[in-house]
Image (tube, rainbow, N blue to C red):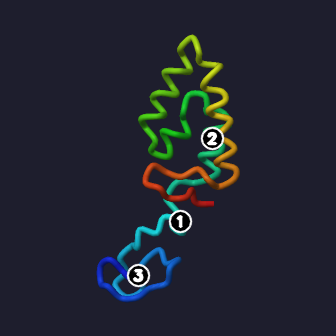
Amino acid sequence: MYCKNCGKEIDDKAAICVHCGVPTGNSAYTLGNKNWVTALLLCLFLGGMGAHRFYTGHTGTAILQLILTFSFFGLIISAPWALIDLIYIICGKFKTSDGYELSR
């Protein structure tokens, strides 16, 4: 792979260019600044209200989940949604809104 900034060849898994120091945008190998344990606990205890989604920057879906929680269909929709998110967080597949993995 080549750096988008300086054009020099770099490792495919590099998070930053070793020549110029610019981030490569390779989000598959870059960790975000959001903590995995925090997201896990927020999802576990306040998942139905979308707290973990607010924390990771998914504001739009967090507001939707919050609205659904206090609506008539709240338990039917929000609880399974939070459970699926919890599984994703545990498996390490849940990412921030920027596409970065949660740091462990």
Numbered disc 1: secondary structure: helix
Numbered disc 3: secondary structure: loop
Q: Name which of mark 3 and mark 2 comes first in the sequence.
A: 3
Q: Name which of mark 2 and mark 1 comes first in the sequence.
A: 1
- The percent coordinates of residue 2 (x first, y second) are 39, 82
Q: Which residue matches tag 3?
A: 17
Query: In front here: 31 or 87?
Result: 87
Classify 10 Å Cα crowding around label 2: few (below 14), some (14-19), many (20 and above). Answer: many
Please tell me which residue is depicted at 68% across the width and 35% down the height of the picture.
83
Marks 3 & 1, CB-CB < 8 Å contact: no
Q: Does residue 99 sit above or below 62 in this rendering?
A: below
Numbered disc 2: secondary structure: helix
Q: Amino acid at mark 2?
A: Asp
Q: Which residue matches tag 1?
A: 28
Distance of mark 3 from mark 1, alpha carbons? 15 Å
* Residue 69 image-quadrant placement: top right
Distance of mark 3 from mark 2, alpha carbons? 33 Å
* Residue 7 image-quadrant placement: bottom left
Please tell me which residue is depicted at 69% across the width and 53% down the height of the picture.
91
In-image side of 43 versus 25 (left or right): right
- The percent coordinates of residue 43 (x first, y second) are 63, 38
Q: Amino acid at mark 1?
A: Ala
Q: Which mark is residue 8?
A: none
- The percent coordinates of residue 21 (x first, y second) are 37, 80
Q: Nearer the viewer, mark 3 or mark 1?
A: 1
- The percent coordinates of residue 71 (x first, y second) are 53, 14
Q: Which residue matches tag 2?
A: 85
Which part of the image, by quadrant, shows the C terminus? bottom right
Please tell me which residue is depicted at 59% across the width and 18% down the height of the picture.
74
